[in-house]
Image: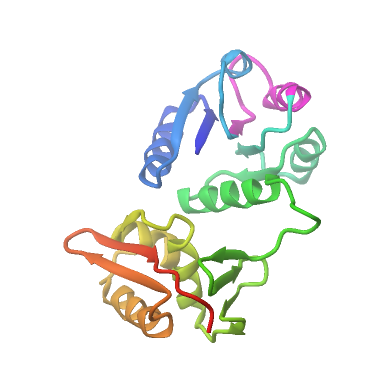
């Protein structure tokens, strides 16, 4: 996924770039509104700071929205209600106040991208993985062969995270940051416990491959519904 980051604060921008790249995002960084409006693209989502050196970010938001429907997430130190309302009324899809964590920004990006996807034949339904597994991210429910599977909150969060990119190798640090806490520094044994639980509950439907010294890779193994 390609991200246009419009941010003049270098430490903030570098932190975001590093965090987003760890999760596989491609990031183009510009520091002014003029550069944002002249950027040739293409990009899938815009992260837009309001406090730019050459123009108000709200004007940039208005101009970008006038050009098309690319999702725009405002990231700003302006946290009062008026700025939030104005930003959303000008066409922003979401508003994140500084300070924020990379994990939160990624969650907001994924949420606006899900909303931006074209809806097929009415409302979008649960995500299907193979013939047997569905995940309803809106309702936080998982079904196997049409029957709901009882999961703990962290089991659900882990499954939902790993199925966002089947086949991708996720490091332990990425998983702990996304599922447990952005600042987790404790032992990761709890991750192994939850992986083992998912393996038991979804035998024959998914495989969770442990890559020594790195992390885990989830694959959809398919199979016919019973």
Residue occupying image coordinates x 41% and y 36%: 17
Left or right of 76: which side holds 178?
Answer: left
Q: Is residue 86 magenta?
A: no
The answer to which quarter of the image holds residue 82 is top right
Residue 70's x, y, as percent? 67, 33
Left or right of 175: which side holds 113?
Answer: right
Residue occupying image coordinates x 67% and y 37%: 71
Residue 180's x, y, as percent? 42, 68
Residue 7's x, y, as percent? 53, 28
Residue occupying image coordinates x 80% and y 36%: 86
Q: Is residue 47 magenta?
A: yes
Instruction: Tell me where the magenta segment starts and ends, as one range.
Output: 46-67
Instruction: Give whichever of 24, 218 is nearer the camera.
Output: 218
Residue 143's x, y, as percent? 58, 78
The answer to which quarter of the image holds residue 134 is bottom right
Instruction: Give whichever of 97, 214 is nearer the camera.
Output: 214
Residue occupying image coordinates x 74% and y 52%: 120
Q: Is residue 203 above or below residue 104?
A: below
The answer to which quarter of the image holds residue 201 is bottom left
View extreme (left): residue: 213
Q: Is residue 143 above or below residue 124?
A: below
Instruction: Give whichever of 108, 83 is nearer the camera.
Output: 108
Q: Is residue 185 above or below residue 103?
A: below
Q: Is residue 30 above or below residue 109?
A: above
What is the total number of numbered labels drawn onto the structure image? 0
């Amino acid at each position: 996924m390609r991200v246009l980051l419009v941010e003049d604060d270098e430490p903030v921008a570098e932190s975001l770039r590093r965090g987003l790249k760890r999760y596989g995002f491609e990031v183009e960084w510009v520091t002014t509104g003029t550069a944002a409006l002249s950027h040739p693209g293409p990009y899938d989502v815009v992260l837009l700071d309001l406090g730019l050196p050459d123009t108000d970010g709200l004007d940039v938001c208005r101009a970008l929205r006038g050009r098309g429907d690319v999702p725009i997430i405002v990231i700003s130190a302006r946290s009062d209600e008026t700025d939030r309302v104005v930003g959303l009324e000008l066409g922003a899809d979401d508003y994140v106040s500084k300070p924020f964590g990379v994990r939160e920004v990624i969650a907001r990006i994924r949420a606006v991208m899900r909303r931006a996807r074209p809806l097929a034949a009415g409302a979008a339904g649960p995500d299907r993985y193979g013939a047997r597994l569905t995940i309803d991210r809106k309702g936080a429910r998982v079904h196997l062969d049409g029957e709901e599977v009882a999961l703990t909150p962290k089991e659900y969060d882990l499954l939902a995270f790993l199925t966002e990119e089947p086949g991708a190798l996720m490091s332990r640090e990425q998983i702990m940051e996304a599922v447990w806490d952005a600042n987790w520094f404790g032992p990761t044994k709890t991750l192994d416990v939850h992986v083992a639980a998912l393996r038991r509950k979804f035998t024959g439907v998914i495989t969770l491959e442990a890559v020594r010294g790195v992390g885990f890779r989830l694959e959809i193994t398919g199979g016919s519904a019973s």
